[in-house]
Amino acid sequence: MFSNNVKCDIYIGQGAGKKLLNDIENARKTIKIVSPYLSPSFTKSLIEKKKEGIDVQLITMDEIKINRNHKGLVYNLINQNREIIEEAVIKRTKFKKRYRFLLLFLIIASSIMGYLTYQAPQEKYLIAIPILFVVFILYLVQRSYYRNTRIYNYWYSQYFPFKVFLSPEKGYGKGKFIHSKIFIIDDEIAYLGSLNFTYNGSKGNHETRIRTTDKSALNDLLIEFESLYESSSPQIDIQQWGRSIYREPIN
């Protein structure tokens, strides 16, 4: 897109995101953000805005995935959902009853055999050893089935609508690295510049930013945002991403 003769104000220096964060906090209807880098606390604030009824949309890049320190950020983007497999619960309960019964049998039978051997040592009692061994193996098998029966299925959902595009090298040469920083609040205020939606970008770094309420420019930016959001560029699969981050206990 190209726009000229746009009325705006310009800020250069530290704290370039102060006014931006204030406008986001005061959003009444919508928040649209394009930022390749994010801070966990900032994504968490978007969840809070979503809970307040604000329509939130986010476009970012997969750079947030490669930094282990950003796992908290991912937890703020995707929610783990779990469902119980009822048939598996019933089957697992049966395994539990069986291995407990076998354990009780082993304890009682071993005690009786030990007592009889002590009272009247005879080789005929040794015939019970293979039987106890077989029961012990059955006990181990049933206990293993119990412990390894999956009773939970997992799937992942977004706390709010977002797209995480793959960088070209991870998308097999397709797509593009989106390095733009665009912030649109209530479709009435827009910010452009160098600052990412991060703590350092908003408060610590020396950044540039432009703020505009120009209607013509906003219309162009909204079109550009929707074009990016609906892009067919390769994206991270949310289900696969969730499985790589969250633990998934089977029971």
Image (cartoon, rainbow, N blue to C red):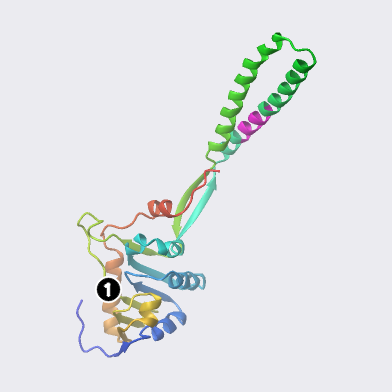
Name the side, left or right, on which 251 lies relative to 236: right
Q: Position of residue 169 (x, y in %)?
A: 22, 58
Residue 11 falls in image quadrant: bottom left
* Element assignment for label 1: loop
Give the camera-side residue of 77 and 38: 38
- For label 1, the residue is 180
On the image, which quarter does residue 120 sit in?
top right
Look at the image and give the residue range highlighted in magenta: 93-101
Instruction: Please tell me in which quadrant of the rendered image residue 70 appears.
Output: bottom left
- Characterize the magenta stretch by its predominant secondary structure: helix
Which residue is located at x 75 percent, y 16 percent? 117
Q: Mark 1 is on which residue type?
A: Ser
- Residue placed at 31% from the left, 76% from the top? 182
Q: Residues within 10 Å of mark 1 (few under 14, many from 20)?
A: some
Residue drawn where x is 38% and y is 82% of the image: 204
Q: Nearer the viewer, residue 1 or 236?
A: 236
User: Is residue 94 shown left or right of residue 64?
Assistant: right
Whole-percent x, y for residue 29 in the image = 44, 77
Q: Using the image, determine if residue 63 lies above or below residue 93.
A: below
The quarter of the rendered structure image containing the N terminus is bottom left
Q: Could you tell me which residue is drawn at 33 percent across and 67 percent down?
A: 60
